[in-house]
Image (cartoon, rainbow, N blue to C red):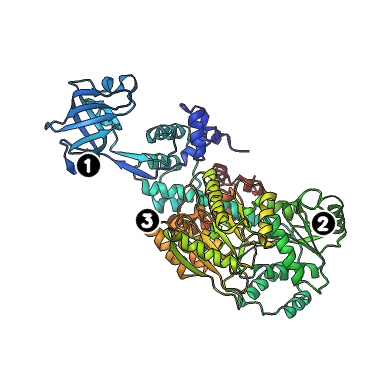
Amino acid sequence: MRPSILNPLFAEASALKGVGPAVARGLARLGLNRAVDLLFHLPVSAIERFRVEELSMAWVDRIVTVELRVVGHDAGGPRSPTRVRCMDEAGNPVTLVYFSDRGGYAKKLLPVGERRLVSGRLERYGQALQMVHPDHVVPVGTADTIPEREPVYGLTEGIANRRMGVLVQSALERAPELDEWIEPSVLSTRGWPAWREALTKVHALDAEGPARQRLAYDELFANQLALMLVRADTRRRRGRPLPVTGKLAEALTAKLPYRPTGAQLRSVNEINGDLAQASPMLRLLQGDVGSGKTLVALLAMLTAVESGAQAAMLAPTEILARQHLANLTALLDGLPVKVAILTGREKGRTRAETLERLAAGDIDILVGTHAIFQEAVTYRDLGFVVIDEQHRFGVHQRLMLAAKAELPAHVLVMTATPIPRTLTLTVYGEMDVSRIDEMPPGRQPIETRVTALERLMEVYAGVGRHIANGGQAYWVCPLVEESEKGDLAAAEERAASLREHYGAAIGVVHGRMKGPEKDAVMAEFADGRLSVLVATTVIEVGVDVPNATLMIVEQAERFGLAQLHQLRGRVGRGSGRSVCLLLRSPAISETARARLALMRETNDGFRIAEEDLRLRGAGEILGTKQSGEAEWRLADPVQMAELLPVARDDARLLVDRDGGLSSARGQAARTLLYLFERDAAVGLLRSG
């Protein structure tokens, strides 16, 4: 159970003063549903206010605080603003402008003849100076109520910055003093404040460098401690060794028309080394799109089969599961290995027969979606589990599948999203990692071009020629910020336009479609019944359509590098030459220009991922926004690189020296795990 001291922080945001239904909806749009979310909603920048005695054009576009004398009011009509004429101490005129001045608010606030201290952004209006809706208007003797520096928060419609600041302060009032979980030597060396003091300083913009670092460290330390506890628990449990004889693997490689790459063979050896041990394997297999992860996974599954165990392969979607089945069946042709599939589509007698065969041990390798770890599914002897596209599945689902085995099963998770080394430690710290960092021979690099959107009609002509020659193409529409409806409209509009030019063989997939509906369109494209597939979201990772050799990404500057690389990987899957065309908007930033230039320059996913981490940060790099997993709220990439090794060493010291969390610092760390919602690991603690 969560420690009671944290309960005030996990109260709904609606429990805070001033949060009615409308404000609660606005906060929810920002993911701020509880007091703790507001606490961790750190300022993104600061307003600097300059105290001036005399106004001039030199101060235009700056936020200034100045003493003014009110000269008069010009009230407009029902739709016109109220203008308050004022003068500074030197007699320079300035107008304060109020739109929608209901009830004569401006007149009450600024009576004629009175002096007021006014703070806001100074603007130029023709040859005159004005201030629209000043931030602060206070009596002259209360200058201390106007802050010189003010935090600026991420906002949404209906919640102004000042309101957000008040809500954050309300959340801060709920923050308790907590016992220290950081190793004392780390704390003193870094000069970091205590946890609550650090939060207060960051929100007050007071000596915030060390305070921000401390908060980032807390998040990284919680993560590393949780991963370490999961890892220690896995190693404590006794599994079963699956010794390698290599006969089936040799039979398979002998009939391949190519030799596996050195990176594939190295990965197979690393996996086989783990399988030979009694402690269950937990290994991540990283490989760029097309690097041959499936073959590595199959060779490992054959080791399990040779040892008399069954293997299961879990895919995130039905279409990917069927694709894996087709690939495995072709590779295993002529070998004494029985493969079957189980997805939501298998029903009635077919499903019952599969379940019977599985329980009897008549199926060696089962491929499927999450259906393969439902309660009704029983294995005779599950020894090895392969999970494709790891970031789609949580730790909970991994454990459910591994629990199907009598003894804990060996687990191999695969991802086609190249992950920077820093992030690998952060997200997959409980796993050993194998990297396939070279491509199979004969695979042609994809040609990447960048073209301006103004040349759209030329692009249409090129698509027409491509289709006429029997080719297929993907067309990815831009991400419309915060609006699925916007994404959908963009895709439908593009598909309609393409149909006008090329007829009806144009399909659309988008994030609001149900799984089976999306799978049906993808299957039509895979079967060649559609010429162009228009997509709003990242097209299903791993979908293999060799005849699709053209990828068009509209407004490519809106996508991150990792996403662009994933999209590009949908083509180049056959022997034909493939092209990825990145359409850019007329005016783009220097950063966006650099990203697109890098895409044109390299096909190396690992280099792209490192650059993406540097440019965008860790929150989005794994598609975590799409998959719903926790983003990094406090730690940025620079802090990760610097603090992660320290956090890992500190977590190891706590686990090894204190044998879990039995010490006073250990109990504080237990609270930390709950604070950052890493409490799934608490069940694994020796001291509870």
In the rendered structure, the answer to whether residue 647 lies left or right of residue 160 reads: right
- Relative to 445, is 10 above or below? above
Which numbered disc, 1 or 2, marks the residue closer to the eye? Answer: 1
The CA distance from mark 3 to mark 1 is 27 Å
**Element marked by disc 1:** loop
The CA distance from mark 1 to mark 2 is 74 Å
Relative to the observer, which residue lies in front, 582 or 204? 582
Point out residue 216 in the picture as x, y percentages from the top left corner.
Answer: 46, 49
Residue type (three-letter) at the residue carrying disc 2: Tyr
Relative to the observer, which residue lies in front, 243 or 421? 421
Residue type (three-letter) at the residue carrying disc 1: Val
Point out residue 250 in the picture as x, y percentages from the top left corner.
Answer: 75, 78
Which labelled disc corresponds to residue 379?
Answer: 2
Label 2 CA crowd tier, 10 Å (few <14, some 14–19, many 20+): many
Residue type (three-letter) at the residue carrying disc 3: Ala
Q: Which residue is mark 1?
A: 60
Q: Quadrant of residue 151?
A: top left
Which residue is most to the left? 90
Which labelled disc corresponds to residue 587?
Answer: 3
Mark 3 / mark 1, whichever is N-terminal: 1
- Relative to 672, is 161 above or below? above
Point out residue 368 in the picture as x, y percentages from the top left corner.
Answer: 74, 57
Say how many tags the image has.
Answer: 3
In the rendered structure, the answer to whether residue 274 lies left or right of residue 642 reads: right
Which labelled disc corresponds to residue 243?
Answer: none
